[in-house]
Each structure stands twice: as C-alpha cells, then as structure tokens.
Image: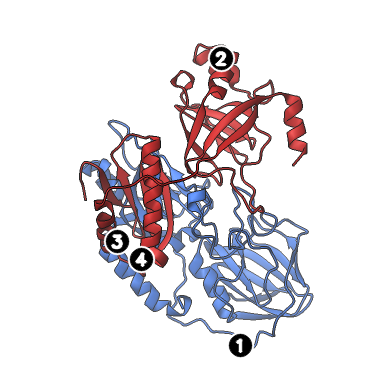
Amino acid sequence: MNNDKYRIVPNGDSAITILFNDDISEHLTKRIIGFSLTIKQSLGEALIDIIPAYKSLTIFFNNRIILLDKLIGEIELLLSSPLTEVSYQSKTIEIPVCYEEGYGPDLTSLAQHCKLSVEDVIAGHTQRSYLVHMLGFLPGFLYLGGLSTNLSCPRKSTPAISIPAGSVAIGDSQTGIYPVSSPGGWHIIGRTPLTLFNPNSQTPFIASPLDKIHFVSISKTEFTAIKKSF
Amino acid sequence: MSLYFIKSGLQTSVQDCGRSGQMHNGISNSGAMDPIAMKLSNWLLSKPLDSAVIEVTLVGPKIQFENDMYIAITGAKFELYLNNQLIFNNKAIQIFTGDVLTFGTLQCGARAYIATSIDIDVAKLFNSYSTHLTVNFGGFYGRSLKKGDILALHLPKQKCLYTNTLPKYVDNGYSGSYILRCTSSVETDLFTQRQQNDFSSKKYTVTANSNRMGIRLKEVAMGFEKPIDITSSGLMQGSIQITPSGLPIISSVDGQTIGGYPRIANVITADLAMLGQLKANDKVNFMLISNEKAIEVLKEQYQILNFLYK
C-alpha cells in the first residue's frame, strides 16, 4: 500500500514495517508510540514484538496465526482513522556526564572538527534536552533526537574496537550513550557513571520512548562518588 | 548435581528458545542458533522442548558428569566418546556418575546441542535461560563456559523414564553448501533490478568473522552507483544487509534490533535454523521466493517436524 502518508512493506515472512513519510519529530514519535499501543490491543497473541523507530514501526507477528497479506489489510484499516498522539507523562532524566580528561578521548578532536572550544562543546551538549525516540541496537541504547547541528561530526572511518560502557558519544547528527562495552564508530566526549542496562533489576532500562534526557556535567570526583554508590 | 568442564570448547554456552518480545528494548532474541536441533535434543529425552541446553560451537568440550542421567546430542556431527568409547548423536545416551564425554573432530555442521535429563540450574532473565554473548547477560554468568567451570543442575524431579527415537526421515546431514530461500525486505525496492539479479546469481563464502550476531559473507554482491541512504528501523533475524562495500551480512540471534544498512531480502523463517550450521568456507546461495511460497515451505516443515511444534 502506498499513499502520501505511509508505505507498508514486508520485512521478511514474519514482519512488516510501516514507513511514515513525515520528517523525524516529537509529534511523529508520539503518533508512532500511540499507534503501537493500538496494534498491541488489536493483534493480541498474533503479535510477537513491535519495534518503533524514528519514522517507522516494525510489527513482528506469528505467521502461524495470521498471514502477511491479511495483517497488512488490518493495519491499513487501523491507519485509515487518524493517528492520535499517545498521552504519556514524559519524564525528564538527568544523566551525569564527566567530560574531563580520560573520560572523553575524542572531545578535543571533535571540538576541532566543529571549530569550537571544548567548553563550547560541553555547554552545547548540556544545554539542551533530548527526546528518546526509541530503544534499540543494544539493550537499553537510547536513540536521542535534538543534538545541536553545531556539534554534528561524521562517524569515524575506522570504528574503535572497544568502547567502555557509559561512554557518551556523538556520531553524525546523533548523540547517545553506550549501555554496554562494545565496538563503535562514534566520537567519545564523556562518560556517565550510571548503568543504562540492569538486566537483574525490576527497572532494567533508564528511560522509555518519549522521555527527555538532560546531560549534566560532573567532575571526576563526583563520577567516582556516584559510581561507588551503586 | 553438576557438570564439570574439563575442557570448554571454542564457544560453549547455555541456550534455549530465546527471549522474544524484547526487541523494542534493544534486546535480541538470543537462544539456540539452530532451534530445530536444540528442540530435537530435548525431544529425544521427552523433556519440554524449550528446556535449557548446552550449545557447542565448532570445537566441543570435555565434560565429566557428577550424576547419573541421560543426555542427547543433536545438530552438528562430531566424533563423540564416552569414556573413550565411540558413541553417536541423535539418540538418548545413558550416563553414570563419573563418566566423561569428549567431543572429537567436527564432521559436518557448526553447532551441536547437548540436552540433559536433569534440568540445568541457571536463572531466567526476561523469560529465558539463554546467554546473550555479545552483551554478557543470561545463562551461566552471561558468558561461555570455561575450563574448570561447574554447571549446576537441579535436583532430579523424576527419573528419565522414556526416551524418543529419531524418525528416519529427519535428515540432518550438513553438506557445507546451502541454498537459503528469502523473501522481500524493507529496502528491496531501493535496489535496482540489476543489483537484485547480481545478488541472487552469486555464490558466497562464509567468513570466519561470522558469529551469533551475524553471518558475514565474502564475495561482493553488487556495486553501488550511489549509496542507498536509509533511516534506521527494526532489524529482524535473517535480514540480509548489504554494507556500503557490497558485502552481505545476515543478521542472527544476538544481532542488533535496529539497523542502518539497506536490506535486500530476509531469509525465510523455515531456513533460519540453517544459519546455526554455517561455518567458515561454507558456500551460500540465495533464492528469492514469494511470501506465499515461504509460508508453504514453513507449513511443510511443521508437518515433517510436527513433534517439535506441539
């Protein structure tokens, strides 16, 4: 199905992806999250998982219960009524970040690339609040929107082999936090002492889609103190 | 009640059917890379099919049993010895306290599964016993087993009273050369007809960089006149992503949940288990089929293996 608002395409034999034509925005994410709740209610046990992203919604379904064509029909029907924004009490989560030497190995080179001072980069990064569009890639990784265009910087051509958990980074026009130690091509500008993925906890993730993230600059001493308190 | 690992093997971990329904939190399914062989090992011991098992990769472990029990080994074929006596896979094997199981040379396939009649004692995380090896959580301390590890087992609830025998028609030879059937994916339309033809006409070689996150293939699938730029979206298991240099990567059980490379096709559900048996230098061809055909193939598989889909 094609129209000016969305396209529904297969994503293999057990998933479909709805691609929305709108630009990435908070408004779109609110409608995507709202629609994902509608689909959850409507599909019941035929639904295995539903993955929101910037401009899409991927519906992973049990193809023993429902066939792809029938599902597309049902989704089109649901999409024929206007999508309403989800009513969600957005939380603002403060994430302490140490931008000092030894915590942000790429801060100086990123500042040079952006033709800014290190202080300007830190100020630019901490002034704004960022919207959580979705979780994904790695457990608890937050896809954040709202980075100042002044701070965007192309990804490294050769990714670093291992980036420590909690690293706060910039890649292209995005900023994010590595929840676990992993390889990665973003520029590391600081590190948070918080743990973003706690598989053994009742609340394994620090934020949900539509929450807001605010980075707060902390010293090495504060970093160590917070780290110890966990 | 335990298993003692005299040798660990290359990558030996606790797995089950995986944790579904957590992709929206960034948590991939994990679980056995060959879920058919995994379920078969439990079925041979008349256990619930999703019971935790041990996944063995390319080089197998050497295990001493601290209790009497039954085991069944399925999947990749290895030379197997119990106290230096040759034994065979795909059947229940009676074990006595002190027995030592040794995995010898790999004959075909890549991953074998060991089911034990006494349940493996690890905690469930997000409703699964499986180990996420790239993020290191779940299963046995979130990691693969090491030499000297002791994997605890529960107290036996009951004796293993009856075991099953593998039906003869269940063929599990692994030739090392495979045709993976696939259907249309999110970005299929963004590839030119020529690129799609190039993709399905080539024979690919599995590289040694392949793992539970993904199967990386050698042989450039196609050239790009201009790069295909996409906005990241939900990435399913079996997605065939084409990197900017034209190399295909097939996403697997521990893969990322959102991806940014364009996908030319997705391996059909019925062929996903085969990904678990691919190893370096195996050959792979892709065959594009319709969604209707994919469902037909899946239904046939359910019929043939109906005892695994109760």
Quarter holding the C terminus of chain A is: top right
Could you tell me the amino acid type at mark 1?
Tyr
Q: Chain of mark 4?
A: A
Could you tell me the amino acid type at mark 4?
Asn
Drawn colour of chain A? red
Q: CA distance from mark 1 to mark 4?
A: 33 Å
Q: CA distance from mark 1 to mark 2?
A: 71 Å
Q: Are marks 1 and 2 on the same chain?
A: no
The residue that label 1 is drawn on is: B162
Give the residue at x 46% y 78%: B310
Judge the density around disc 3: few (<14), some (14-19), many (≥20) Cα neighbours within 10 Å: some
Which badge, 2 or 4, comes first in the chain's sequence? 4
Q: Which mark is residue A63?
A: 4
Q: Chain of mark 1?
A: B
The percent position of residue B76, horizontal first and vertical second, equals 54, 66
Q: CA distance from mark 3 to mark 4?
A: 10 Å
The residue that label 3 is drawn on is: A71
Q: Which chain is blue?
A: B
Could you tell me the amino acid type at mark 2?
Asp
Judge the density around disc 2: few (<14), some (14-19), many (≥20) Cα neighbours within 10 Å: some
Dot 4: element: loop
Q: CA distance from mark 2 to mark 4?
A: 52 Å
Q: Is residue B50 above or below residue B128?
A: below
The nearer-to-camera label among 2 and 4 is 2
Dot 1: element: loop
Q: CA distance from mark 3 to mark 2?
A: 50 Å
Q: Which mark is residue A120?
A: 2
Q: Are marks 3 and 1 on the same chain?
A: no
